[in-house]
Image: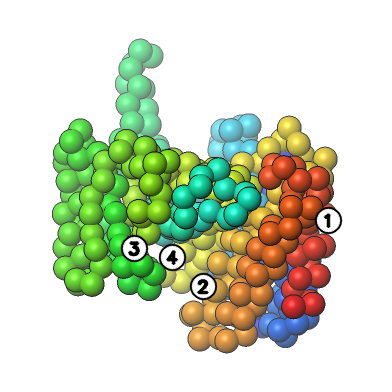
Amino acid sequence: MTKLLLLPGDGIGPEIAATVDRALVALDKRFRLGLDIEPVEVGQSLLAKAGTTMPPDLIGRARAADGVIIGPLSTADYPPAAEGGHNVSARLRRELDLYANIRPSRARPGIARTDKPMDLVVVRENSEGFFADRVMAVGNGEFMPTPDVALAVRKITVPACRRIAKIGFEMARERKRKLAAVNKRNVLKISDGLFLRICREVGQDFPDVEYEEVFVDAMAALLIRCPERFDIVLCTNLFGDILSDEAGELSGSLGLSASLNAGAHDAMAQAVHGSAPGIAGRDIANPGGLLLATGMLLRWLGRRRSSASLHAAADALETAVERTLADPSQRTVDLGGAMSTGEFGRAVERGILNS
């Protein structure tokens, strides 16, 4: 039995989560995975009913499950946490120690906004950096000592750098054996200096991986000019968040951008894009990112369990999504097509069952 929590989220979340549920049911039917998919209400709808965006027992339920799939959240519209507006994604990342955020991007013919053969993965440290909600044991890393002064703390530690660098180098060894460590060492001399020192130390254990260091502003330009030059793009938290969005848009649409938040014992699939409330309920959102993220979660579980069936299910889901995207008549509005969210989901379901 494999238990997965499915958290639809806000805005377009319920629509795209429904396509994931449909795909998982099809995969379970074809590969006999023994999936137990448990929907869990979070976000604005729960806030309206119960005064909180997150069930009080969610962390325990997530730890007990084999994986979590979470839709987009309208966190900018939530009230303060003291009034029930909890950032569910951030809480899960922190409480489950999901320190590695893996975000692949590649160019697809007829879809990509670049004519270069981009195929890279942003490996983003997920537990510290400039993110104010992830740097303090108590309180917040952003504060105002006076009404006219705002300060933010950046936290960079040796253990966090070492474990994310190890993930990056291991992935590089399995792919094209190239890794670029993104930094702004010319300005952030101490914190990025520490990050790079650990990257170099870890890199000594991977002599077969080509290693380089690239300033973040240069990387933003190089992703447009020559994205094919890069394979694993290793970043601290904020830089990885920004650059992966850029790479995702170059791939054709943020709607196709998938990510996996992974730790030593738990993992959470998540699309990169936001909740898009402006198109919620119109059945036009692109569910590709969350579907591909679900495939990443199944592959992560397959590795942990040495399960050929979970690997095969991940392959089947990815193949069904890619074959659907390859047909211009089956693309969603953001990709220049006319297919609805539900129709895209049904096409992926057919691809799973009929391949």
Image-quadrant location for residue 228: bottom left
**Callout 2 amino acid:** Trp
- Residue that appears at 30% across and 59% down: 179
Instruction: Give the secondary structure at mark 1.
Output: helix
- Residue that appears at 61% across and 73% down: 314
User: First in sequence: mark 3 or mark 4?
Assistant: 3
**Callout 1 amino acid:** Glu
The answer for how far apart the CA atoms under marks 1 and 2 are is 28 Å
- Give the label on residue 300, or none: 2
- Give the label on residue 343, or none: 1
Residue 16: x and y in percent read: 73, 53
The residue that label 3 is drawn on is 168
User: First in sequence: mark 1 or mark 2?
Assistant: 2
The answer for how far apart the CA atoms under marks 2 and 4 are is 11 Å
**Callout 4 amino acid:** Gly
One can see residue 108 in this view: yes
The answer for how far apart the CA atoms under marks 3 and 4 are is 13 Å
